[in-house]
Amino acid sequence: MGNVYIALLHHPVYNKRKDVVATCITGFDLHDIARSAATFGVKKYFVVNPMPAQREFASRIFDFWQDEGSLEFNWTRAEAFKLISIKADLDEAIKEIEAIEGVRPKIIATSAKGEEKRLESRNLRLEIRNANSPYLILFGTGWGMTDELLSRADAILEPITGNSAYNHLSVRAATAIILDRLLGD
């Protein structure tokens, strides 16, 4: 299996008016995405937010699940939290992967929007299984990553589609579905 990293980006993302904003970190996103990451063998889960108060909030939750009492109370959650790395921006995450792997990761963005350069999940799954190089899969919050951010990606993964016109999954649900498609048995 390849070396897969994921990043949950809180900036730069759009709000529903298409303003560029920074969104807030939620405890649910920390817990649930870390558990999905651990389940599917992700090497590291980056939580990216430029706001110091938001990073401090995430650090307090992270620290809680790493203390001895929490380890004893719920070791599985504590184990998943070990994958979390809190960063101010995407470049910090990329630099950390380069330091670990010795090469820049291939960056794959996710988007619910229709994009021209879509990569099919089954093709990326095969590529990851046959590669030694690292991959960084980006997940956006709010109303999606900005066009500028999407343009930094090497590819954009095909969106998850249901059988209705409604298309606004929680990032936790989307992450679990995509990780299953790419890394599941």
Image (cartoon, grey):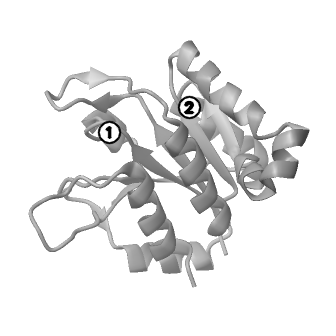
The residue at the point 56 percent across, 74 percent down is 183
Q: Is 163 placed above or below 17 here?
A: below
Name the image quarter holding the N terminus: bottom right
**Which dot marks residue 91?**
2
The residue at the point 81 percent across, 55 percent down is 75
Q: Which badge, 2 or 1, comes first in the chain's sequence?
A: 2
Coordinates of residue 78 in the picture (x, y in percent): 77, 49
Where residue 141 sits, quadrant-wise, is top left
Q: Amino acid at mark 2?
A: Asp
Where residue 12 sits, quadrant-wise, is top left
Q: Amino acid at mark 1?
A: Met
Coordinates of residue 169 in the picture (x, y in percent): 29, 55
Where residue 150 sits, quadrant-wise, is top left
Q: Residue furthest right?
A: 68
Alpha-carbon distance for marks 2 and 1?
A: 15 Å
Mark 2 crowd level (few <14, some 14–19, many ≥20, 10 Å Cα): few
Coordinates of residue 47 in the picture (x, y in percent): 57, 37
Mark 1 crowd level (few <14, some 14–19, many ≥20, 10 Å Cα): many
**Which dot marks residue 145?**
1
Taking the image as drawn, is residue 29 in sight?
yes
The residue at the point 31 percent across, 22 percent down is 21
Q: Is 11 placed above or below 124 here?
A: above
Coordinates of residue 52 in the picture (x, y in percent): 57, 14
* Local secondary structure at mark 1: loop
Taking the image as drawn, is residue 133 in sight?
no
